[in-house]
Amino acid sequence: MARRKIIAGNWKMNMTPTEAVELINTLKPLVATEDADVVFCVPAIDIIPAVEAAKGSNIQIGAENMYFEEKGAYTGEISPAMLTDAGVKYVVLGHSERREYFAETSETVNKKMLKAFEHGITPIMCCGETLTQREQGVTMDFIRQQVKVGFQGVTKEQAAVAVIAYEPIWAIGTGKTATTEQAQEVCKGIRECIAQIYDQATADAIRIQYGGSVNAATAPELFAQPDIDGGLVGGAALKPDFGKIVNWK
Ligand code: 13P
């Protein structure tokens, strides 16, 4: 069974609510496609106007983070029920920027994964090595660890619909895309890891994205790889170029 591609933008801390609506209106006709799922992961405050602006289009709105408790005294956090009520379908979890600047660990990512599934939100779980880890030859060991901990307690039915984004940290925002071979190799390794944890059918179903300086020039070759099911795009998702990335074929 061929996996459906999923191409997501991660806006990070960019775009005010007004700018978000403008960008969605600009991109709407450019990202129209029936061949892939198209997701815009936007800052929390942009979610409601973004859902409204995307109505009637193929764009689905995702969040960039979420807390793992239902509700209560967690000042500044956003709950899964708040996201679903606002129309959110996907949530990015464990982005390397959250791990680096906001003390996110694979353990907290795991709690968030379980909560997201409980609420019917599809997680896009990020993993990826530093340049030092790549040079030390421990890339796959590190990523297997992130995936195993992140998926602890996740059922195989849930895992089958999850999304994993492989984002080598050294390729994020650096303009230095991983080579197609490097990206395919790790995405294949992640799929093998899922097969080990669950079974081959689950590994065949789960979607694995590549992220890290993806642009309109690099997307076609990356997305044509057998184990790369789309991309998680930062900078280029804020520009009309995103239309070309989505329509990479
Ligand atoms: P860039 O595409 O800007 O390198 O960002 C990648 C990323 O971190 C997406 O989550």
Image (cartoon, rainbow, N blue to C red):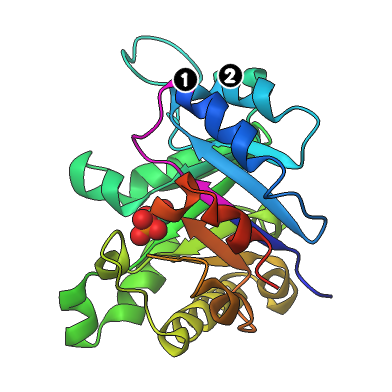
Q: Residues within 10 Å of mark 2 (few under 14, many from 20)?
A: some
The structure residue drawn at horizontal position 44% and vertical position 45%, both measured from the top left corner, is 93
The structure residue drawn at horizontal position 30% and vertical position 54%, both measured from the top left corner, is 96
- The percent coordinates of residue 68 (x first, y second) are 45, 30
Verify CB contact (< 8 Å) between mark 1 and mark 2: yes
The structure residue drawn at horizontal position 77% and vertical position 36%, both measured from the top left corner, is 57
Q: Which residue is mark 1?
A: 17
Q: Quadrant of residue 128?
A: bottom left
Q: Is residue 208 above or below residue 83?
A: below
- Position of the N terminus, as image quadrant, is bottom right
Q: Does the magenta segment cover residue 13?
A: yes
Q: Is residue 87 above or below residue 171?
A: above
Q: How many marks?
A: 2
Residue 34 visible (yes or no): yes
Secondary element type, mark 2: helix
Q: Nearer the viewer, residue 5 or 248?
A: 248
Q: Quadrant of residue 182?
A: bottom left
Looking at the rendered structure, which numbered label has been put on residue 183?
none
In this picture, residue 24 sits left or right of residue 178:
right
Q: Quadrant of residue 231?
A: bottom right
Secondary element type, mark 1: helix
- The percent coordinates of residue 143 (x first, y second) are 37, 71
The structure residue drawn at horizontal position 43% and vertical position 41%, both measured from the top left corner, is 11
- The percent coordinates of residue 14 (x first, y second) are 36, 34
Residue 234 visible (yes or no): no
Q: Amino acid at mark 2?
A: Pro
Q: Nearer the viewer, residue 54 or 98?
A: 54
Distance (Cα) linking label 1 and label 2: 7 Å
Q: Which residue is mark 2?
A: 49
Q: Amino acid at mark 1?
A: Pro
Magenta part of the protein: which range?
8-18
